[in-house]
Amino acid sequence: MKISIFTKIKSLIYYYINTEKGKFELFHYFQLFIYGSIVVIFIEMII
């Protein structure tokens, strides 16, 4: 079970690094993560 999950993760990483669409998606998720962090910090400063 653990091995199949690891293989899936490896193939996902390979997909994201080696395809143009994958790179775009990865960048998009990274941007969302950064914006989310900024919003959380901003809300914590207000409260």
Image (cartoon, rainbow, N blue to C red):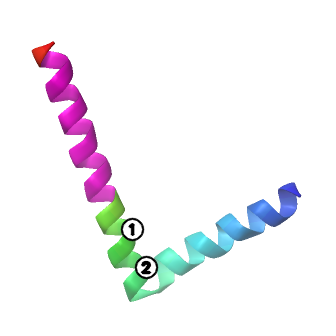
Q: Is residue 9 left or right of residue 39?
A: right
Q: Is residue 14 left or right of residue 21?
A: right
**Residue placed at 48% from the left, 76% from the top?**
17
Q: Is residue 10 left or right of residue 3?
A: left
Magenta-drawn stretch, dominant element (helix, strand or loop): helix
The quadrant of the image that shows the C terminus is top left
Q: Position of residue 4 (x, y in %)?
A: 83, 66
Which quadrant of the view contains residue 8? bottom right
**Amino acid type, callout 1:** Leu
Q: Residues within 10 Å of mark 1 (few under 14, many from 20)?
A: some
Asked if residue 34 lies in the magenta stretch, the reply is: yes
Q: Position of residue 24 (x, y in %)?
A: 33, 77
Q: Residues within 10 Å of mark 2 (few under 14, many from 20)?
A: some
Looking at the rendered structure, the number of numbered marks drawn on it comes to 2
Q: Position of residue 13 (x, y in %)?
A: 57, 70
Mark 2: secondary structure? helix
Q: Residue furthest bottom?
A: 20
**Residue placed at 33% from the left, 57% from the top?**
30
Closer to the camera in the image, 12 or 39: 39
Q: Which mark is residue 22?
A: 2
Which quadrant of the view contains residue 46? top left
**Residue placed at 30% from the left, 66% from the top?**
28
Q: Which mark is residue 26?
A: 1
Q: Residue furthest top?
A: 47
**Amino acid type, callout 2:** Gly
**Residue placed at 14% from the left, 27% from the top?**
42
Mark 1: secondary structure? helix
Closer to the camera in the image, 40 or 14: 40
Against 17, residue 42 (above or below) is above
Against 18, residue 7 (above or below) is above
The quadrant of the image that shows the N terminus is bottom right
Range of the magenta residues?
30-45
